[in-house]
Image (cartoon, grey):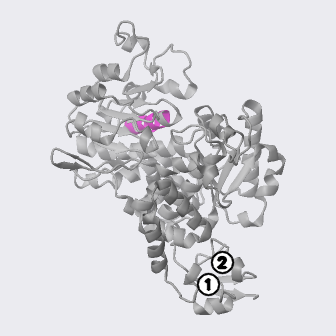
Amino acid sequence: MPDMDEAVSLSALSGAELLSSPLLNKGMAFTQAERDRFHLHGLLPPHVATLDEQIERRLEVLRRLGSDIERYSFLRDLQDNNETLFYALLVRHLPEMMPIVYTPTVGLGCEQFSHVWRKPRGVFLSYPNRQHIREILAHPRYDPIKVIVMSDGERILGLGDQGAGGMGIPIGKLALYTACAGIHPAQTLPIMLDVGTDNAERLADPLYIGWRHERIRGDEYDAFVEEVVSAIQGRWPDALLQWEDFARGNAGRLLNRYRDRLCTFNDDIQGTAAAATGTMLAAIKVTGIPLTEQRIAIVGAGSAGCGIGGLLQQAMIEAGLSPKEAKKRFYAIDRNGLLVDGMAGIEDFQRPFVQPRSTVRWWWLKNRKHITLLDVMRRARITTLIGVSGQPGAFDEKSIRVMASRTSRPVIFPLSNPTHRAEAKPEDLVRWTEGRGIIGSGSPFSRVRWKGRDFNICQTNNSYIFPGVGLGVIATGARRVSDGMFMAAAKALGEVSPAFKEPEDGLLPAVTALREVAFRVAMAVGEHAQSEGLAPRCDRATLEARVRSHMWDPVYRDYAAQGL
């Protein structure tokens, strides 16, 4: 791995081999001295370019491309050719690049992953090769790894099972770890658990790159995951493992199984919860309704929705409510309507959000089997509506208009990704609330113009949370990741809201400020880890120096030769 210092010493690597190393390649930016030193003359045009020139050249080509999937493929190729240039382009043009490498285009990238495949990146751990897992991970190229993002591809955004194509998510998430928090790319590893797929379209695709088999489940699946986690724990005992896009039946139980064994978290459950909670803490500065008086409906009572509800409940308790009172303020709506005790199929993680049947017995209308969102809006005087259902149109006009008629500043977060899976379009929400809605979305949306006014749509996205959490964990050497660390991250995010100074400004800082947000989150996470005894104690100045020292900047270093 290249050092993070200003000078880098290379040994036994030169010529075409050096140009083929994404972590070391500079392309035409190799100096004349380096071209002499590493036998690069003739392999490159004579012009010596600067990083700025290279960025402009790549940007010019990117902007000429005709579709987002072409731009996604172009950036993936650039990442596999020259990582410093890739990240420099990302960091300097993050608002333009982030929707391509991350949501919403990454969803399309996963769907077409087998068709845009160019070069290997990360590790595919396939079920038929389960006896070789430790051998695969033992290669010296993986020695520097500190952050792992792992998926089994079963619940990719709101798109469902994408099989091996789900690898696009770990690759995209780790790109943001580097772009937004400065984690060195040599320290990151995307892992795909290829356990088959139940997606008939993928299995029928002659170009599909994954294992052509229906998904394994039950004991076989659990044994495979156990083998992988044990191998990771043995290979990198101090690394951070992030779980991504596991299905509802696996996400929470796997987190609970392993969270006390190694340093790990589930971004869909905990990262989403922290992002929503941090944005909510900012929103109450605008609404004037304190957290203890909020009444919250969550559409999509899966692991992500219940994770959001759990962290918001805890925030209410810390703000002064009793646990009993906090529980009363949440209304969780799933595919069969409002969760009510006695309903069939209630899962353990949903139980804290089940309403007593006696409380809502008058809410049912004649000939109606379930209590709908509209019923909840009419009866519960909801002030905040959060969607993580993956169902476009789940926030219907009638329900939103009822909500807006009963609260002066309704808070509405359609958080499902990608864009076409959002529960409602922001322009509709602005119109249905007559411009009074405070709106945050999971994917980026353009500002909305309504009756001569411009409305900024806040992107309530995990990218404000997980890069900083990872940075804080690495910088402090935390042994575990606790729920308290995510609460600290949420509060840190809320505290940097522009709305604290000016309620009419955006709820969250601009995407261009994500590096500074990651630093603030990392500091809060590190301090809380120390307070819980999960990381060695140090003073704030030392902690700040440690966090800053782990933030790599994508600029070219000078290369010196050894052994050539």
Image location (x, y in percent) of residue 23: 63, 72
The image shows residue 303 at horizontal and vertical percentages of 53, 34
Q: Amino acid at mark 1?
A: Leu
The residue at the far right in this view is 131
Q: Position of residue 3 (x, y in %)?
A: 62, 76
Identify the magenta region: 306-316
Q: Quick check: 245 above or below 89?
A: above
Residue 496 position in % (x across, y down): 34, 56
Q: How many marks?
A: 2
The amino acid at mark 2 is Leu
In the displayed structure image, the side of residue 68 where residue 113 appears, left or right: right
Say what secondary structure mark 2 lies in. helix
Q: Is residue 349 above or below residue 449?
A: above
Vertical placement of 426 versus 56: above or below?
above
Q: Quadrant of residue 297?
A: top left
Work out whether residue 468 or residue 179 is closer to the camera in this orientation and state it.
179
Q: Kindly identify which numbered label has been placed on residue 104.
A: none
Q: Residue at x 63, y 37 (%)?
A: 201
Q: Secondary structure at mark 1?
A: loop
| Viewport quadrant of the N terminus | bottom right
Residue 542 at least partly seen: no
Q: Which mark is residue 19?
A: 2
Q: Residues within 10 Å of mark 2 (few under 14, many from 20)?
A: many
Q: Main secondary structure of the magenta part?
A: helix
Toward the left, the furthest residue is 452
Q: Is residue 307 magenta?
A: yes
Residue positioned 52% across, 51% down in the render: 106
Residue picked out by circle 1: 44
